Amino acid sequence: MRLDHGFERAFDPRAVAVVGVSRSADKKHPGYSGLQFLRMLRGSGYKGQVCPVNPKADEIEGVRAYPSLAAVPEPLDLVIVTVPPASVPGVLEDCAAAGALNVHICTAGFGETGEAEGRGLDEVMREIALREGLRVVGPNCMGLHVPSVGLRMYEGLPLLQGPVAFLSQSGSLVHVFIAFASTLGVGCSKAISYGNALVMDAPDFLEYLATDPETQVICMYLEGIKDGRRLTELVRRITPQKPVIVWKSGLTESGARASASHTGSLAGDRQIWDAFFRQSGAIRVGSVGEMADLAMTFLRLRPSVGFRAAVLASGGGSNVASGDICGEEGLDVPAPSPETRARLMDFVPLINQSVVNPMDVPGVLTDIRLLKRALEILAADPVINIILLHPDTLLLGFIRGKSAEAIAELGEYVSDFARQNRDGKPIVAAMQPHEMVVVTEGLAQELREAGITVYSSLSRACRALNRFAGYYSSLAEGGEGAWPRRSPPKETSPAL
Amino acid sequence: MRLDHGFERAFDPRAVAVVGVSRSADKKHPGYSGLQFLRMLRGSGYKGQVCPVNPKADEIEGVRAYPSLAAVPEPLDLVIVTVPPASVPGVLEDCAAAGALNVHICTAGFGETGEAEGRGLDEVMREIALREGLRVVGPNCMGLHVPSVGLRMYEGLPLLQGPVAFLSQSGSLVHVFIAFASTLGVGCSKAISYGNALVMDAPDFLEYLATDPETQVICMYLEGIKDGRRLTELVRRITPQKPVIVWKSGLTESGARASASHTGSLAGDRQIWDAFFRQSGAIRVGSVGEMADLAMTFLRLRPSVGFRAAVLASGGGSNVASGDICGEEGLDVPAPSPETRARLMDFVPLINQSVVNPMDVPGVLTDIRLLKRALEILAADPVINIILLHPDTLLLGFIRGKSAEAIAELGEYVSDFARQNRDGKPIVAAMQPHEMVVVTEGLAQELREAGITVYSSLSRACRALNRFAGYYSSLAEGGEGAWPRRSPPKETSPAL
């Protein structure tokens, strides 16, 4: 179905009904119940009316309850349905009668079970929804997460606001994404978990997000899609304005089997999805982590069509491995110019360190005075347009062994440099969390706050930077996207 | 060169000389100095004689010092050389004169600098070593790490003993490997960091490790090799007795550049190395972590030529992704038999959970009673020959939220089951460390101690199990190794 005007009210509802709210938590069913939605609406800063529906209660946890949707006097911008599967069609009829057209069906147990009963219910629900013009999110999903108005998808999920939307068939992956993205400082405009996509599918939600002024970057987790052609066309139209980052799962035999039983989705053929990515300009990723990394990159770095990175690393063997990772992930790591090499070798010893690129320079990464000189030299070198700091696990351990003051001093200097050079070359860092190095996340936060973009490994940094540059390169060429690229693209604009 | 009889004494030396020991730590050069080697020999349980050599000192930190190697009365089984590059040839002559033929040259600054001076010194050193029959480890390396006799490569490096040897051109990767492998409970027989491989190269050390009774699994980190044919033949001969796990780096342009400046190695052509892996039966990995995972697998699991895994996971979307990971990494995850499916569905609800494989069963993973039933059912199913537990990040967070007693009870039960089923199907677990889930490593240790093999992610579990099964499958077929395989091999022996 196409979205009717009125769906946007679901994201800023004046009143929300929750149908199927028990008076006490049901210990037998540990899944999310109506009561849990009620509690989240009340505990997350939501300012509108909350209307629990339960024919046997006048009041639930101090909130006035209604025997039916018909009894609710407010115009309902959103109805959350948590009754058992067989009762859902009746609730949909009630929604239509009450003029409440935005319906989130949380309840599971339909087509995804593979049983005749569930499939029959699907048919009945689809008929009602289409006949009455219901805008149904679900079934079998967690619905909406809108930090700006206090709609929360899971208890305890961060409400950090920002310009990134996440559209996902899976609720638990919304949880993982929002929680992880928050640690990167990446906030959310809207997240939508839409499960089985009975009547509204990814393109319907995409149309809404395309015009949503709060959303600048769109992330999607897809298991299946009904109208692939429409999705391709839509993404192709959106992508010049807003990057669309897509994780498509279920492309192996066992993944497809899991997908069918999760959301009843037909995962589809690998070649068809390859064509989708080629034709639509969607940016392909393979995990929630890569998706958050890339969203962070779009929020933090200025547009660039290519990266020639200077990689400041440490540890001889690790440095060789770093070179391989950059090469395999398509990040361009050029040999330094003779001038830069000569200037660096004024203070980097020939022995046990190295200024070929990637550079094995533990001395530079642990001495503020030397780091300052190195950053200035690299900032002046036109061959280089991004500086990537990559202290290895051992060096992070060494940094942890230093006093807290020494760490703070180091962080402060790099931060100062980054601040003073906000219009200059970006500085990013890759720091692998490791059981030996608990300090990493604290250090990472400190650097992030100072304007340095921090990734959790070199591979992930390369992947995000490669796809980021690929997106802008594709736009500059006016061509279709085809990412990730495996080798550096030719540059079509001057270095940053 | 071929190893002469006598090299094995270097690994259990009655006396060690360290040439170039300052009386106080040199703040200007943060690299490892002779004094640091002296301190490590004294502080790591080494029982033999330690003989520092310094022409200007009678005694260093309470140890009698000698003016020259000639002045040392003991027969020296190992000489560690840390003097500046230009002085090394003279020390080699002294070693020869003193009959001390096992020499570790720690000093760097030779061919790897790319300068004429360093290359000239290489020639001189090579001539002396070959003329005098010196068994030179290095130069530009950290030498030997032998926990059983208290030879330690780096300050603070664990001395956990075990049957895994690590042969590495890089010293820092020995550090990372030993530290990480220790957290997995994987101990070391011998580690050798051999840097530039001036006269003794990987095959020479391999010949020693092949006959070393303390070594059952051989791991190698290679940047370059002089005699590829000899290495191939040697690995082919060793591999039926001891698996040889190899990480070859420097196969990209930037990796090769870093390799040349690290150990002066020519990294070689990708196709040549592909042929090496095909012909030799060496097992290919791409990082220290994968290497340690695989070594752990060889130590903990009984030989098997194939795995058909039941994957007990959690979270709908994560479960689809899990299926993809297993499929891409070549782990066989078959649909359960109708009987197993029916028996599991006695207690796994049809709604919101799933027993297709991978199985989305959060209820089972958090309820001891249900887990017990599931493990018993899967243990009885001949289709399945390994059980892989894969609670996702959210479930680990949930487990953390439970009381310490509940966690302990869960760990205890799974452990009990694993203990009682030591001769049955192996149980392994994949648990992704994550900033949100600090509990993981403690839980992992607990499970490891109970006989469950724990990997730090599902991908890494699949990779290790795939290569492990591939090794035994190749042996069973009497053919050459060609790993990793991308699809499950046909099984040539009954299920475990």
Image (cartoon, coloured by chain):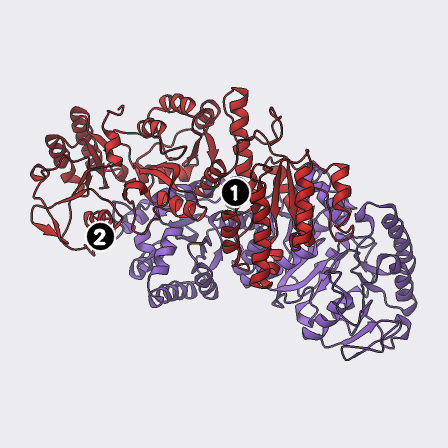
Chain colours: A red, B purple
Q: Are marks 1 and 2 on the same chain?
A: no
Label 2: chain letter: A
Query: Under tag 2, what secondary structure?
Result: loop
For the point 16% across and 55% down, the residue is A24
Residues packed near mark 1 inside 10 Å, few (<14), some (14 to 19) or many (20 plus): some
Q: Which of the two marks, 1 or 2, is nearer to us in this view? A: 2
Front residue of B470 and A115: A115
Relative image position of residue B331 (x, y in whole percent): 48, 45
In-image side of B176 versus A435 (left or right): right
Judged left or right of residue A150, residue B420 is right
Residue B58 x %, y %: 85, 78
Point out which mark residue B195 bears.
none
Which quarter of the rendering shows the N terminus of chain B?
A: bottom right
The residue at which mark 2 appears reads as: A29
Residue density around tag 2, few if under 14, some if 14–19, many if 20 or more, within 10 Å: few
Q: Position of residue B308 (x, y in %)?
A: 44, 47
Answer with left or right where residue A7 lies relative to residue A339.
left
* Residue B476 in sight here: no
Please tell me whether mark 1 sits on a helix, a strand or a loop. loop
Residue identifier under label 1? B489
Please state which of residues A354 and A495 is positioned toward the viewer in this rendering: A495
Q: Is residue B92 above or below residue A31?
A: below
Q: Residue flagged by tag 2: what amino acid is it?
A: His
In the rendered image, residue A19, in percent from the top left (x then y), is placed at 15, 42
> Looking at the image, which is closer to me, B419 or A121?
A121
Task: Please report the residue visible at 17 percent of the width from the left and 30 percent of the height from the top.
Answer: A124
